[in-house]
Image (spheres, coloured by chain):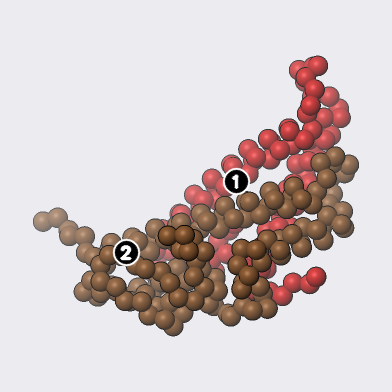
Chain colours: A red, B brown
Amino acid sequence: MDKSMLGDLENLPEEDKIRMSAMIDQLQIRDSLRMYNSLVERCFNDCVDSFRRKTLDKQEETCVRRCAEKFLKHSMRVGMRFAELNQGAATQD
Amino acid sequence: MAAKATSSTIEKEQIFGMAEKEMEYRVELFNKLTHTCFNKCVEKRYKESELNMGENSCIDRCVSKYWQAIAPSRLPSQFEEGKEDVAHENLWALHNFDGRDGLAKIVDGGEVHEFNGGVAKYGGVGQSPASCFS
């Protein structure tokens, strides 16, 4: 989510603009932290199953890295489509 | 002498409050959408770090279907410009706010809601899904 979602912020009076902007910033920070936490939880759940050692082995490390990359790419793509649908753009099948 | 909080200030606060709730709703919606489509479209084995073509199409369609499930009338082909997006409508309310004498008119895409004190009843075109559960 970013400020471009609410494109007509420019037409608001100055004090309202500042207030809305601050609101959006707060939401953004909260959302980023939440996303980070959920990403770690997800990748841990999917990749780590045994506790014979106390450090991640090579396989687990690779798995976690791929999981994180995949999820972030996925999240970006979803964001793109979400924004398109928000604007009422026609999507191809 | 302390400044008196006018009813138009209160009404403005209400609009800000609604706009904030609206944005929180949107963020939550996006998060749920992201998690759901990831669970449905991406295999847990993580053979590689890129999304393959199948996953990409799956994601696109998943988002589209999810969007349709939210509100069947909100498919892009049926969009009326400027009317459907509820977050925009709240912003409309904010900068068409006319705080005269306690009577405020909120212009809602052409439909005027008048109220005198009390809580602004939000309705009209593109009604917020959240308001259906009040």
Q: Position of residue B69 (x, y in %)?
A: 65, 63
Which numbered tag is attached to residue B119? 2
**SS for tag 2?**
loop
Q: Residues within 10 Å of mark 2 (few under 14, many from 20)?
A: few
Would residue A87 be seen by someone viewing this image from the given angle? no
Name the residue rendered at 77%, 58% in the picture: B59
Which numbered tag is attached to residue A32? 1
Residue type pointed to by label 1: Ser
Residue type pointed to by label 2: Val
Q: Position of residue B77 (x, y in %)?
A: 68, 78
Up-down relation of residue B96 to residue B16 (above or below): below
Q: CA distance from mark 1 to mark 2?
A: 33 Å
Farthest-out residue, left: B1
Name the residue rendered at 52%, 64% in the picture: B129
Up-down relation of residue B58 to residue A39 (above or below): below
On-image quarter of the N terminus of chain B: bottom left
Farthest-out residue, bottom: B110
Q: For this view, does A15 lie left or right of residue B5?
A: right
Up-down relation of residue A30 to residue A44 (above or below): below
Which numbered tag is attached to residue A4? none
Name the residue rendered at 54%, 46% in the picture: A29
